Image: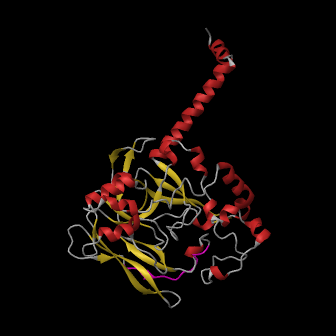
Amino acid sequence: MTLKSKETEKQSLPPSQSFLSSVGSLAFIIILVFAFKSSILDANNIPSGSMIPTLKIGDFLFVNKMRYSLRMPFTEKELYRFDDPKRGDIVTFAPPNRDKIRALLIELGLSPELSAYIPPAIEENYIETNAPQKYFGLGNMFSKRFVKRVIGLPGDSIRLGQAQMKANRGDVVSYTFIEYKEKGSNAFTNYNPEIHPIGKELSDLDNVNAIGKSLFVENKRDFKHFTIEGSHVGSYTFFEHCSRNGGVCKIPEGYYMVMGDNRDDSSDSRFWGLVKREDILGKALIIYFSINWKDYTCMYKSSVENTESDPYHEEKYESEELFKHCHISEIDRSMMNESLFGWLDRTLRYRIWRMNIRWKRIGRILE
């Protein structure tokens, strides 16, 4: 058979075989893409304000999933460990469930029944808050992922206190002061928080609760990062039990303490416990896109994202005018658990037309 006849035979394949070949090639490419996402480089969006101002609502970031471990694609089972998280790293992790919280309490010598009083860690549920991924999920590919900053390592002894610090406007705010004693050390140290001019860091937030707060910087290893804080309210459910003897919580081997940079609005280790090393999946790398959807500030007539003003005294839209700018679920947050159709309806009718792209945040390296 000549070369020409072979080509003719190939071109004359039945349509069904040609279609199946195309589908097979497409399926293979899709599998490779998701394998890459699950074990090498993941992409996440930020739906909550717990890491403001480092990460704002509507930021999209790449996560280096090979920074600490090599994991089996689609399962996230750890095959080989390269390194461990460092102090100050921004990490993504699988949120602890009740069983893991109970096991931690037993290891710390606390009553496992305390886990019944620890609120479920749902604040940064990438799937159920402003994200369509839950409708197209694939096993563990789009399950819950939290993002926080590591502030305590295995073997550390941690003390938390409320320090009164002078703010930019001359008032005094209560700051969550973190002290730590490294394994083998005899002395406590801290992250040396300092007040910082607000500038543009607390603008364009889409978060009314963060507006009007004070901006600080803390020192981690060889870099600095922003934190915000105002008037602290409430108690630290887990930490208060962990530190019942002398006000110090000792972190066991294999665990890490994580907190959000937005200290007044972060569900983190202070409330629901420590994170196991095996549950830390990657390190936040870079912001590749950022959108201000204005889901939380859509009802205000003027821009409330000017931190010099009090948003609660700004004029809001009312009645029919309000529903021209905001979806009902954005007015009543209890209705945000929406269907796929509801999410599409809200996005197409409201969010796209009022959104702003934060061009200056694109390409920001995360520390």
Q: Position of residue 269 (x, y in %)?
A: 39, 65
Nearer the observer, 117 or 132:
117
Task: Tell which of 282 and 161 is nearer to you.
Answer: 161
- Total tally of numbered discs in the picture: 0
Q: Is residue 365 magenta?
A: no
Q: Which residues are magenta?
A: 192-203
Single out the residue that lies furthest toward the right: 320
* Residue 11: image location, x then y, percent: 68, 19
Farthest residue in the bottom direction? Answer: 170
Question: Which quadrant would residue 205 be assigned to in this image?
Answer: bottom right
- Residue 201 visible in rendering: no
Q: Nearer the viewer, residue 265 or 8?
A: 265
| Image point (61%, 29%), residue name | 23
Q: Quadrant of residue 56?
A: bottom right
Is residue 63 something that shows in the picture? yes
Residue 32 at x, y percent in the picture = 51, 38
Which residue appears at 68% of the width and 53% of the height? 342
Q: Where does the C terminus fall, quadrant-wise?
A: bottom left
In this image, 53 relative to 154: left or right? right
> Relative to residue 352, is residue 162 depicted above or below?
below
- Name the residue located 71 percent from the left edge and 76 percent from the top edge: 316
Magenta stretch mostly in which secondary structure? loop
